[in-house]
Amino acid sequence: MLISAEHDVIRMLADPLRLRIIELLADGPACVCHLVEDTGAKQPNISNHLRALRGAGLVVAEPHGRFTYYRLLPDAVETVAGQLAELAQRARTNADARRECP
């Protein structure tokens, strides 16, 4: 579900830093140190955003030695994109279906 009480994915992606993290992870897995370097954000801030993205099912953590790498889940992104495409199609279909006022 695109917007739900549990995980509001649209709101999640509306945050500029979270969106930047998603964009960076689209180029491949990265650890927090890479994301800190690439965004200029503080480590605790990046970690908090990654926790939220993991909770929403957009990112997965993968231990690799002493480090944890984060990977974007393309299926989750495709699901959100599909839901947005469905909303756009409904809007096109119903553009002239004005409801009458009582």
Image (spheres, helix red, strand yellow):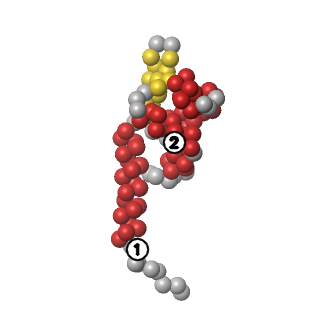
* Figure check: 44 above or below 15: above
Q: Which residue is mark 1?
A: 95
Q: Secondary structure at mark 1?
A: loop
Q: How crowded is the residue under tag 1: few (<14 C-alpha within 10 Å), some, or many (20+)?
A: few
Residue at 44% of width from left, 17% of height from top?
64
Q: Does residue 21 appear left or right of residue 94 in this picture?
A: right
Q: Amino acid at mark 1?
A: Ala
Q: Which residue is mark 2?
A: 19
Question: What whole-number distance in Å separates the C-alpha atoms at marks 2 and 1?
Answer: 30 Å
Q: Residue furthest bottom?
A: 102
Task: Give x and y (percent) for residue 62.
Answer: 44, 23
- In terms of depth relative to the viewer, which is nearer, 1 or 80? 80
- In terms of depth relative to the viewer, which is nearer, 58 or 25? 25
Q: How crowded is the residue under tag 2: few (<14 C-alpha within 10 Å), some, or many (20+)?
A: some
Q: Residue furthest top?
A: 65
- Whichever of labels 2 and 1 marks the residue nearer the N terminus, that label is 2
Q: Amino acid at mark 2?
A: Leu
Q: Secondary structure at mark 2?
A: helix
Task: Give x and y (percent) for residue 38.
Answer: 54, 29
Q: Does residue 88 appear left or right of residue 54 in this picture?
A: left
Residue at 47% of width from left, 34% of height from top?
24
- In terms of depth relative to the viewer, which is nearer, 7 or 53? 53
